[in-house]
Amino acid sequence: MKAASFDYIKPQTISQVIDLLQQHGDDARLLAGGQTLMATLNMRLSEPQWVIDITGIESLRGIRVHGDALRIGALATHTEIEFSELVAQHAPLLKAAAPHIAHRAIRNSGTWGGSIAYADPAAEWPTCFLALGGNVIAQGPQGERRIAADDFFTGLYSTALQPDELLIACELPLAQKDHWFGFSELARRHGDYAIVGMAASARREGAALRGLRIALLGLDATPLRARQTEALLEGRALDVKLVADAVACLRQEVDPLPDLTNAPDTKRHLIGVLLQRMLPHSTHL
């Protein structure tokens, strides 16, 4: 199929984008990397009257340290994140997750901001963003505001962004010397959408983890925090029994949605397998 007809515009400033969003509302769609939008247009799952191309706005690009946070611009590509020395130093979870995202051609074009704003519950970046406890920087008619990762994902492909707001960047806390992270997913083939996945972040304190955040992908309408499992593990020295208890807790607290090839019980089992594999690496049990 081919896309329905639409008008195309390429503004040069963020304020022009916001003006266009105010004028056209739900009749407009933003084009960044286009790896999702072009597919939905061609399948006529999306039929906007306007496509607003934001790729000419240089202020949306770049990765830099900003105060006590790593700031990733909305137009930073997956590949730029994958090979960024700043990311490797300050947010190594992202470097570990990047190779799992689709294939090289998509990583070369797809953008960080597009992935976070699209909020696919089976995508890697939203899950990592939630695990790291970052903040979205959104800009609208009233100026900038920050939205915590815990408050950003509101439903299937929906977020706390207002219709006339643009995601301009995200800020992530800088990893410290005692930082621990883990990322793993299971897919039928490398590059396919994951059946289930997990991203985790914490501070290592001897054999224990503090400030643990476990985010799950592929289970529900949004990426999820495994809060009961986090609470069980918080500050306790890891041993074989505690890991087993945590796996049982995780399987009990999740209520997975099925997909075309996997039943909820299959996903419940697999997410426990990922946790069981990941936790021993945090303290080398």
Image: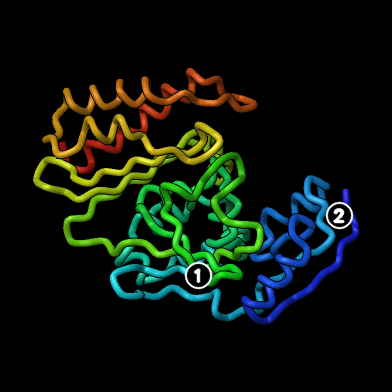
Q: Which residue is mark 1?
A: 144
What colour scheme governs how the chains and residues are painted in the rendered image of this protein? Answer: rainbow
Residue drawn 22% across and 28% down?
Answer: 243
Residue 78 marker: none
Which residue is situated farthest in the top direction here?
265
Counting from the top left corner in percent of width and height, residue 160 is at 54, 51
Count of marks, rendered view: 2
Q: Horizontally, is 73 left or right of 179 in the view?
A: right
Most foreground residue, 36 or 193: 36
Most foreground residue, 242 or 79: 242
Depicted 17 relative to depicted 236: above or below: below
Residue drawn 66% across and 70% down?
Answer: 18
Counting from the top left corner in percent of width and height, residue 151 is at 45, 48
The type of residue carrying mark 2 is Ala
Rendering quarter of residue 251: top left
Residue drawn 57% across and 60% down?
Answer: 107
